Amino acid sequence: MEHPEKRYSIREVSELTDVPDYILRQWEIRFPQLKPRRDRANRRYYLSGDIEIVRRIKQLLRHEKLSTEGARVRLAQELKGEGRPKTRKEVVDLLDQMENQIRAMLDSLDEV
């Protein structure tokens, strides 16, 4: 018999992520991607995927200094897989584009 994925209470998630529980509740409202489930007693519980989303939101807000709206958009893009190269060729093409842009910027600085 398979065991269901471990459920975490809001207090446990708060301790695991170092994010106060009242902030977690606010993030549930502000980030549609963060939707903990509820049990029959209507208590919320988080799964490991939810905890990863909490950690990513924390990274975007506190370390990358994005606004709530910016973090919401970035998280949505990341969860949809947008903005990430999917193949090695896409990675190489992206790096070539970046190199060309950097060279163009350096050339324009040399002209000044």
Image (cartoon, helix red, strand yellow):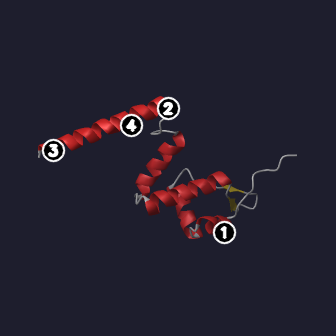
Q: Are marks 1 and 3 in contact (CB under 8 Å)?
A: no
What separation in Å lies between label 4 and label 2 (alpha carbons)? 11 Å
Residue 21: percent from left, percent from top: 59, 69
Q: Earlier in the sequence, mark 3 or mark 2?
A: 2
Check disc 4 and report its element: helix, strand or loop: helix
Q: Position of residue 42 (x, y in %)?
A: 71, 60
| Residue ID for mark 4 | 95
Q: Nearer the viewer, residue 51 or 27?
A: 51
**In the rendering, at what x and y percent does residue 33 appear?**
55, 50
Judging by the rendered image, the residue that carries numbered circle 1 is: 11
Left or right: residue 21 compared with residue 96: right
Q: Nearer the viewer, mark 4 or mark 1?
A: 4
Q: Position of residue 76 (x, y in %)?
A: 49, 46
Per the model, the C-alpha gap separating discs 1 and 3 is 56 Å
Secondary structure beneath label 1:
helix
Local crowd at mark 2 within 10 Å, few (<14), some, or many (≥20)? few
Identified at 53% across, 55% down, the residue is: 56
Q: What residue is disc 2 on?
A: 88
